[in-house]
Amino acid sequence: MEKERTKTRRMDVVLVPFVAFGHMMPFHQLAVALAKAGVRVSYISTPANIRRLPEPPSNLASLISFVAFPMPVLPGSNSLPESAEATVDVPLEKTSDLTMAFDLLRQPLKEFVATHSPDWIITDFLPHWTADVARECGVPLATFSAFSSAAKVYFGPPEFLTGEGLKRVRATSESLTSPPHWVTFPSSVAYRRFEATGALHGFFGPNPSGMAVAERVAKTLSASKVVAIRGCRELDGEYLSLYSKLLGKPVIPVGLLSPEPPKQREISDDKWSETFKWLDVQRPKSVVFVGFGSECKLNKEDVFKIAEGLEISELPFIWALGKPSWAIDDSEALPKGFAERTGERGKVCIGWAPQIQILAHPSLGGSLFHAGWGSVIETLQFGHAMVVLPLIIDQGLNARFLVEKGLAIEVERGEDGSFNGGDIAKALRQAMVGKDGEEMRARLKEAAAIAGDKELQDQYVDEFVQILKGGVN
């Protein structure tokens, strides 16, 4: 039996994100938003991950507790490096081992919930065992998705994620290349052929953890009384409404949870100080930011093609390039002579980059990136022209959604997913300066006004909190 809620006291929730930064950061932003709305939050993760998260605003620190559970150790050949606590710390082939270690946090979570008796557990879709903890402790469960509503609709309700329902609609990779039959309005959100095989195996196929990703999603969705989505009706209303119908339960947009733009520049690193001085003298809205995050590990061929595209485009750019594992030193990370040929109009910074501060700079006018939903939202709030080159997981679906909405240009690719420097340059020039990109740039200005409307975005969180306070039958 679920515990009685006392109307007069402050509401308590427990957040359980998966150990990937594309999950932990949106949960962190949700924690801050809930705290602003007066909710007490316990954010569950591991020690190293918690140390990597930003400090919450000082006025909210008393409402947000970071609860560190040591990352469990797997036996034998499945063991992880001692410092590995997030997907960014392990090669792709070790992700299942990390997931299995993460799954062992079930018991510590149960003990914490039993002791603290929160009003809700708000879970990511991957830790399916939160459904068991919620049931055993008599606490209602909500799922929060850091993925877009378009991607969630595409994957569908639980009955089509496992068993016979799955076999009927997702039997082959070909079945992933068109919108599913439950989409009741015109949509282009589907995988390309070159993406479909990996998606079929990665999402629906078996893995060493013993439970396919789709099975995990089905279990958490089925057990949840409410599903929260990082989105807003002004941008993705038809997908939000359809997803609620598909699930037969409330699907609540919590707003875009945009990270706060910096109020002032605080850069102590000499390299970045010089880079910002360079940005200060560029024309407004003229510079392209290029960044593919820490989870997308570009191979040498792709890096060199992107470099070629930037060179051909003749546009000013700033490129935050993750340190490539295949390069012995920084000089090998780029084509020979690239830095000399583009040095006057471009900057390449290898390693960490203060992305939100770069995007907020008035010289920035566009972004070339992978279409991860978090990066979409970071870019959208500034109204930058978006050129998308999706690489993994849900990125292709987000890219199609953005193009469908007239908010992005996707780099043209061959049937096998190949692209060249000319394809990159063409998309960049169309987005930044081309006449045929004018309508997109106008739409982005409108979308930025929605994303930047703090009153509107805060209202979504307030509505979510009221639903949690009222309970959901």
Image (cartoon, rainbow, N blue to C red):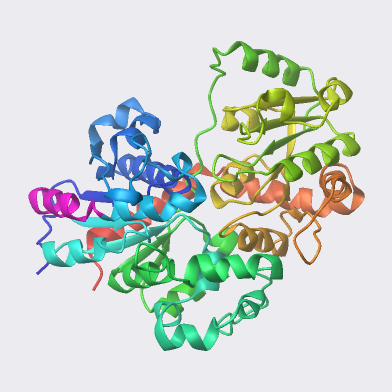
Rendered residue at 48%/47% (across/down): 22
Rendered residue at 59%/65% (across/down): 198
Q: Nearer the viewer, residue 210 or 226?
A: 210
Task: Classify the position of the C terminus by image quarter.
Answer: bottom left
Rendered residue at 83%/42% (across/down): 432
* Residue that extends furthest to the front in the rendered view of this protein: 76
Q: Nearer the viewer, residue 196 or 24?
A: 196
The quarter of the picture where residue 325 lies is top right
Q: Is residue 223 above or below residue 30?
A: below
Q: Is residue 408 above or below residue 24?
A: below
Q: Nearer the viewer, residue 220 or 65?
A: 220
**36 to the left or right of 88:** left
Question: Start and end of the magenta stretch?
Answer: 104-117
Rendered residue at 76%/44% (across/down): 301
The quarter of the picture where residue 56 lies is top left
The quarter of the picture where residue 411 lies is bottom right
**Magenta segment, principal secondary structure?**
helix
